[in-house]
Image (tube, helix red, strand yellow):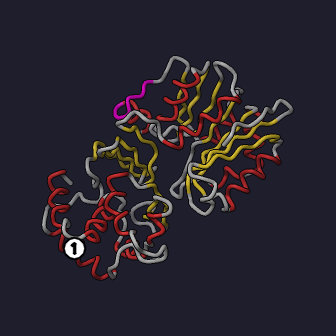
Amino acid sequence: MTPENLRTLRAACADSPTRAAVLELAVLYEATPAQIAAMRVRDVRETSLVFAPSRPGTTSKSAVRLIPSVAAHLRPLTEGSEPDAPLVDASVLEIEDFLADLCASVDTAPLRPAGAECVRSIDESPLGRLRVVQDALGTWALSDVLPQGVVYASGEPPAHVFLWTHLDARLPPAPRLLLLGGGAFVGAAFLEERYAPARLDVVELDPRCLPLARSFFGWVPGPSTCVHTADARAFVDEVDATWDAVLQDVADAEGTVDWLAEPAWAAALFERAPVVTANLITALDGPLLGQVEAALRAAGATEIAIVPLRTRADVSLRQNVFVVARRGADAGPAPAA
């Protein structure tokens, strides 16, 4: 879809907030009419997430963070509504008719693969659809519909990456770091700038991510950085090296991989480093957080800090939660969350 076509479609929706929201969900998040009709106000208001298919042609849903240009269309629909109310006050049939009529009005053959305000890159592989999307606030990497990284036009780091500053009191000068999950490599850039590591190993499964990071996110590996195209678990199992800290920033189509909660995995990481972290997408009162904490303690963690992106009052909201654990008698005081 060209920017001109998308502007045409948006102009056709200008007098209807509901139709504008449906268009954004259908174009960028590839949500079907049935999924749009099933969405509730809480999906947007409480979590800034929207539920969409994990991959075209599948029936499973993923919770994905809204990019600002889409959030601007959806949030007005939540004003004055109960959390369980439908986000879109329209039947599935009405939505289907609307989409059919609207998409017939312009040349939208590539609507599903392209979408978004400005799609700068799109690539399909067995690992999924990888896109680079640009809006007024920044440049985003989307794996299927799950954001993998962003560079804000303001220069601010992504919010969940800024939580990594809670490593400050736990690292020596010029630390050796292992980052599992490269994505758009905005996390790698943050670690390079903040800690000037003596060595930074970044493990990324998708070979498309590194050239994408170079071309669209301005990342050039520092002199101490080495990128490995590999499965994170296989890499940790096979490599003969140790680090001062391991950072886990990996996700599947559902947002967070289950094996982060396996005690054997936690033990394997502690064999490689005294400090182990994880970026989780979960609720503070959900089961995953407790399972990860239990796995870390079973592996010998003597200190665990849990730092949510939002306040601790928001215990039921699915959000980024940074978990940092240290093993051994050398554990010091945790910084204030």
Task: Farthest residue to the right: give it.
Answer: 329
Q: Is residue 252 left or right of residue 178?
A: left
Q: Please state the horizontal and vertical placement of residue 161, each as a whole percent of the image.
A: 53, 39
In the rendered image of this protein, does residue 141 appear above or below residue 281?
A: above
| Element type at mark 1 | helix
Q: Is the stretch drawn in magenta largely helix, strand or loop?
A: loop
Q: Please state the horizontal and vertical placement of residue 30, each as a whole percent of the image.
A: 35, 62
Residue at the disc numbered 1: 100
Q: Which of the 4 image quarters holds residue 55? A: bottom left
Q: Is residue 233 magenta?
A: no
Q: Residue at x 47, y 35 (%)?
A: 186
Q: Is residue 218 magenta?
A: yes
Other residues around mark 1 within 10 Å, as few (<14) / some (14–19) / many (≥20): few
Q: Nearer the viewer, residue 157 or 229?
A: 157
Image quadrant containing the C terminus:
top right
Q: Please state the horizontal and vertical placement of residue 151, each as a whole percent of the image.
A: 40, 37
Mark 1 belongs to which amino acid? Ala
Q: Nearer the viewer, residue 120 or 83?
A: 83
Q: Is residue 260 left or right of residue 154?
A: right
Q: How many numbered discs?
A: 1
Task: Farthest residue to the front: give it.
Answer: 80
Q: Residue at x 40, y 33 (%)?
A: 155
Per the rendered image, the range of residues in magenta is: 215-220
Q: Please state the horizontal and vertical placement of residue 94, each as a whole percent of the image.
A: 27, 81
Q: Residue at x 44, y 38 (%)?
A: 184
Q: Is residue 314 left or right of residue 96?
A: right
Image quadrant containing the N terminus:
bottom left
